[in-house]
Structure formats: C-alpha cells, structure tokens
Amino acid sequence: MPNVAIVTDSVADLPPQVAEELEITVVPLVVRFDTESYLDGLELSPDQFYEKLRNSKILPATSVPPLAAFSNAYDKLAEKTNEIVVISLTSKLSATYQVALEAVGLMKKQCRVEVLDSQWAVMAQGFIAIAAARAAQSGASIDEVLGIARHTMRRVDMRAAFDTLEYLERGGRIGKAQAFLGSLLKVNPIIGIRDGEVYPVARERSRAKAVDHLYTFATGFGNVEGLAVEYATDLDEANRLVERFHSNYPQIPIYLSRASPVIGTHTGPGLIVVTVFGDRQASVSIKCNSH
C-alpha cells in the first residue's frame, strides 16, 4: 500500500483490473428499481442492469453512497496509511462529493483525508484517479498527489454520443444540453462536460457520424497519455473504435470501459463515450450542426 491511498466512486467507470492494479478503492453509488436497491456494479452487473432497463416498466433512479460507505472505506485504509485522497464525481451532477466530505467526520481513526471535486465523471474522472494513484505508488507526498490530480483535471476531456437524451432529461442531469430537447430526442446528440456540467456539443444524423465525431474529437489532441472508450451495450462498436485509435496511437494505453448502471440510468443503453488525457492542439468551436 502506498503512503497515500486513493479513493474514487463508481461513476469513474474504472475497469476493475485497473482499480485493482493501482490499489484504488471504489465506493459504489446506488441504483434503485422501485423498492429494490443495488450497489452500482457490485450487486447489479451492467448486463443485468441493461436487461432490466429494457424490460422494466419502472424507471430506475440513483442515489449517493451512504455516509458509512465512505467512512468505512476511510477507516479500513487508515489501518495501513495516514493519508487519503478522494477523487469525487462532479458536485454539479451529484451530492457524492458532499457525502465523501461529511464522512471524514465519522471516521474512527485519525487520518488526513483530502476530498477533491474532480468536476468530471466517467473515465475523465477515472484518469484523474489513475494519475493520482500512479503518483502515490511512485512515492509522492499527499500534496504532490493533489497537485498532480488538479493538473490532470485540466488535461482531460470527453465526448458522449447517445441514441436519445430522454434518460438524461428524466434524470434531471441534462444541464445546458436541454437546448437539444424537443425534436432532437431522436437525433444522435453529442454532449461534453464543462465546469462540472453537461453541455451540448453537436448533433449528428446517424450513429456512424456520431462515432466519427468522437474519433475526430480525440485525434485533435497532442501529447496524448491515455484514451478510453466506454460503452453501455454495444461491445463490438466500442472495440471497432478502440482499433481505430490503436492505429493512431500505437504506444498509448487505450482503456475499454463499461458504463456503470448509475451512468446507464441517466444515458440509456445507446451510450458510447470517448475520453482523452492529453493537450488540446487547437481550440474547437462548439456548434450544433443541422446537416
């Protein structure tokens, strides 16, 4: 165990083997179907969730982890270390950050815990946790780990394509992307996150064009240190996109990640996400193409 332990939540969508290898503790959010509650990704696998989502007349809902989920995780880690950094889902989309913060006061053990609002979600949040964990494993101090995490926050970006914004609207997480609503519910919308909030980027007439948009977005970066492709249900589509990236970036780690049930609740089964850890080569204008 490094001197600094890293904690994140399940919305970071870290591949399980990555979390295990880097010793990142993942605290699950909660998915609810009516009176049934499940720990995100643990008690309800993505396959089970998306099957349930398609067949259930009851729309799922999500909630933050209980305070005890964080405080128990902190106490367990405090047996091995005196310092913990928590990389949280953006506070603009969830109260998870606040829960992670409040849980520090419930700890039974003495330990320095720093909770960082990542201002991101999915693998953009995941890359911040990965960078922090790698720094911790290399022997960095807690303040150095925090500095690297904050630096990484400025170097990640993501785009997500959907079949419909219906789920995002129902879940109340649509933010500035509500400009897409109305007739656009059935177009292929593309969104990003800026300052912790969802915002509209473009709309495409077909799924193939939407995936091309994600590819073009990702190839507009320099000094790329990592790429991630996330999918909800279409593994073949995600694998094809990973292969396209491999030809451009043969030396760079490309993570294939599954969108967690909590993410799926707000996006539906047609989600595909690309996240880049790198530097923008040039500013890209944000537009809603009418094609």
Image: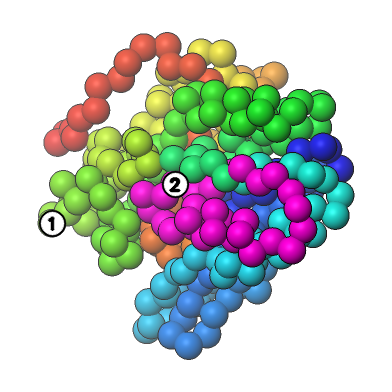
| Callout 2 secondary element | loop
In the image shown, does 212 or 44 lie closer to the viewer? 44
Residue 232 visible in the picture: no
The local crowd at label 2, few if under 14, some if 14 to 19, many if 20 or more residues have their Cα within 10 Å, is many
Q: Which residues are magenta?
A: 87-114
The local crowd at label 1, few if under 14, some if 14 to 19, many if 20 or more residues have their Cα within 10 Å, is few
> Mark 1 and mark 2: span between their CA atoms?
27 Å
Is residue 151 located in the magenta-colored stretch of the structure?
Answer: no
Q: Do the CB atoms of the residues marked 1 and 2 lie less than 8 Å apart?
A: no
Q: Name the mark nearer the viewer: 1 or 2.
A: 2
Q: Position of residue 175 (x, y in %)?
A: 26, 50
Q: Residue beneath label 1, please?
A: 182
Q: Residue beneath label 2, please?
A: 90
| Callout 1 secondary element | helix
Q: Quadrant of residue 83?
A: top right
- Three-letter code for the amino acid on which mark 1 is drawn: Gly
Q: Is residue 55 above or below residue 156?
A: below
- Three-letter code for the amino acid on which mark 2 is drawn: Thr
Residue plotted at (86% across, 43% down): 1
Q: Quadrant of residue 246?
A: top right
